[in-house]
Image: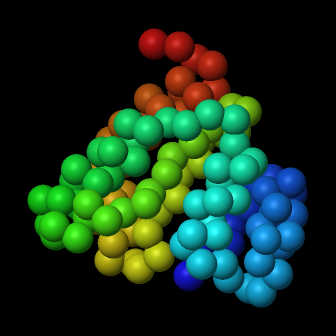
Amino acid sequence: MARRRFKDSSIKKAFENRCPEESCSDSDAIAVTMDVCDRNVPGIAEAMRAHSLKITPNAMLSRAVCMQRGSTLVINLPGSTKAATENWEGIVGVLPHAVKMTAGGGH
């Protein structure tokens, strides 16, 4: 189940409208992310899958998304702590540059 952490009230409202319970399914979290964000950032989700494929062939089943909302980078990590940690390790090195780019900092 997706954990809810929000800094943007409109994203929080979108989650509450889609699934009023305390947590949403992974599919709901992905759908809300896609609904409220402006553009896809596919390379980060691809990197998470590539990193995880070194650990388990099940990584190819991941529906992970990474998107941009205004100047904010939104990353959907897997629901399990183990998988979220593995995915995070695969992308953490590029995040400072990704955040700078998302905020309009350029190369």
Q: Where the N terminus falls, by quadrant?
A: bottom right
Left or right position of 42 against 32? left
Residue furthest to the left: 54
**Measured along the vertical axis of the image, is residue 6 above or below residue 91?**
below
Name the residue located 41 percent from the left edge and 79 percent from the top edge: 80
Left or right position of 85 against 67? left
Q: Position of residue 96 (x, y in %)?
A: 45, 35
Name the residue located 87 percent from the left edge and 63 percent from the top edge: 13
**Measured along the vertical axis of the image, is residue 76 above or below residue 93?**
below
Q: Position of residue 25 (x, y in %)?
A: 60, 78
Left or right position of 88 against 2? left
Name the residue located 86 percent from the left edge and 70 percent from the top edge: 17
Any part of residue 89 in sight: no
Q: Where the C terminus falls, by quadrant?
A: top left
**Measured along the vertical axis of the image, is residue 25 above or below residue 78?**
below
Any part of residue 29 in sight: yes
Q: Nearer the viewer, residue 9 or 36?
A: 36
